[in-house]
């Protein structure tokens, strides 16, 4: 895990209130030869008490946790300000969500960002037969007062294994290479899923949606049992971001262990920060 030197912290402390976060990040990277993101600089400033810590009531926190996946940051901010009579900015709410690992779909493919309710899925199933995608999309958007695109709808149909009757109805366990995702996919009773996920479940049992399967040696055609590794979404993100995936399976497995240690340390740091915040709140109330 990267450690900030005393000189770096002193630099941030001296300049935090003199420039924007983007300017501070740029100056920091230039001075210390780093490639830190604005998020990383904001986080270290927050952890070191170099910026104001915004307090949120528990009911506001619970509201954010419950609605963050179904709303954009702008929509979430508007609802919070209206319901709780606050005056938060979009960046403040976004910063809170990012710091607490609450994501609204940003970073996913556009086709994965929209959340389909049970009613929406049932509507699709009831109206898919012999209906053109264009008509189904138009009726769906009007019925639920949304504005999803054709690609989002077709992606969901593929995941559900549904067809409008005008395209080939593939038999179970048919597989082909999906150019959009760059993987082989296979049709199952649950719909189309990646072949590596399907095989991993055959070897080990059901896998929840929070996990994905990667190839230890990076070869997407090597489906041997030992080459399929289960990782959660956060581990997957950090493996890629920190360039810890290799053609050597053992190196990749070691990289995964490094990521797990990093995330565990990060989680503990959050606990410490929360404990300190609670103490500060108690002292303020006393």
Image (tube, helix red, strand yellow):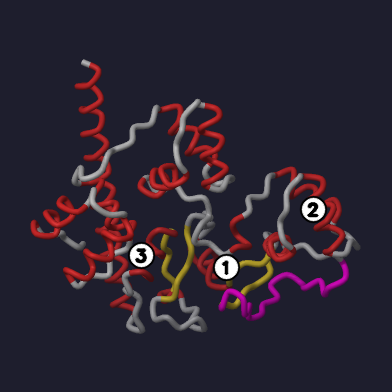
**Is residue 235 rendered to the left or right of residue 119?**
left
| Residue 73 location (% of width, % of height) | 52, 47
Cα separation, mark 2 vs mark 3, equals 36 Å
Q: Secondary structure at mark 3?
A: helix
Q: What range of the chain is rendered magenta?
A: 165-182
Crowding around mark 1 (Cα neighbors within 10 Å: few <14, some 14 to 19, many 20+) is many
Q: Which residue is mark 1?
A: 198
**N-terminal label among 3 and 1:** 1
Q: Residue at x 28, y 51 (%)?
A: 43
Q: Mark 2, mark 1: which one is toward the viewer? A: 2
Badge 1 marks a residue whose secondary structure is helix
Mark 2–mark 3 contact, CB under 8 Å?
no
Q: Earlier in the sequence, mark 2 or mark 3?
A: 2
Q: Residue at x 54, y 39 (%)?
A: 67
Label 2 residue SS: helix
Q: Can residue 33 be seen from the camera position used here?
A: yes
87 is higher (above) or lower (below) than 183: above
Q: Could you tell me how far apart the alpha carbons at marks 2 and 1 are, in whole angstroms? A: 25 Å
- Left or right, residue 149 beside residue 280: right
Q: Position of residue 125 (x, y in %)?
A: 80, 53
Image quadrant in which the C terminus is located: top left
Question: Can you identify the residue that label 3 sits on?
Answer: 238
Q: Which residue is mark 2?
A: 124
């Amino acid at each position: 895990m990267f450690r900030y030197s005393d000189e770096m912290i002193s630099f941030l402390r001296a300049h935090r209130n003199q420039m924007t976060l983007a300017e501070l990040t740029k100056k920091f990277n230039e001075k210390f030869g780093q490639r830190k993101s604005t998020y990383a600089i904001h986080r270290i400033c927050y952890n070191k008490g170099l910026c104001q810590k915004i307090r949120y009531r528990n009911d506001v926190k619970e509201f954010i946790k419950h609605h963050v996946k179904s709303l954009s940051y702008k929509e979430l901010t508007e609802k919070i300000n209206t319901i709780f009579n606050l005056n938060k900015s979009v960046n403040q709410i976004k910063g809170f969500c990012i710091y607490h690992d609450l994501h609204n779909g940003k970073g996913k493919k556009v086709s994965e960002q929209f959340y389909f309710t049970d009613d929406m899925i049932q509507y699709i199933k009831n109206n898919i037969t012999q209906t053109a995608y264009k008509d189904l999309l138009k009726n769906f958007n009007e019925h639920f007062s949304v504005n999803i695109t054709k690609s989002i709808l077709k992606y969901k149909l593929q995941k559900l294994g549904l067809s409008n009757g005008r395209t080939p109805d593939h038999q179970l366990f048919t597989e082909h290479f999906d150019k959009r995702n760059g993987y082989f996919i296979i049709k199952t009773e649950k719909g189309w899923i990646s072949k590596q996920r399907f095989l991993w479940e055959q070897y080990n049992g059901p896998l929840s949606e929070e996990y994905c399967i990667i190839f230890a040696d990076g070869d997407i055609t090597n489906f041997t049992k030992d080459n399929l590794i289960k990782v959660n979404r956060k581990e997957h993100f950090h493996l890629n971001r920190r360039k810890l995936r290799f053609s050597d399976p053992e190196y990749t497995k070691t990289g995964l262990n490094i990521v797990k240690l990093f995330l565990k340390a990060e989680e503990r740091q959050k606990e410490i920060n929360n404990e300190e915040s609670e103490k500060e709140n108690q002292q303020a109330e006393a």
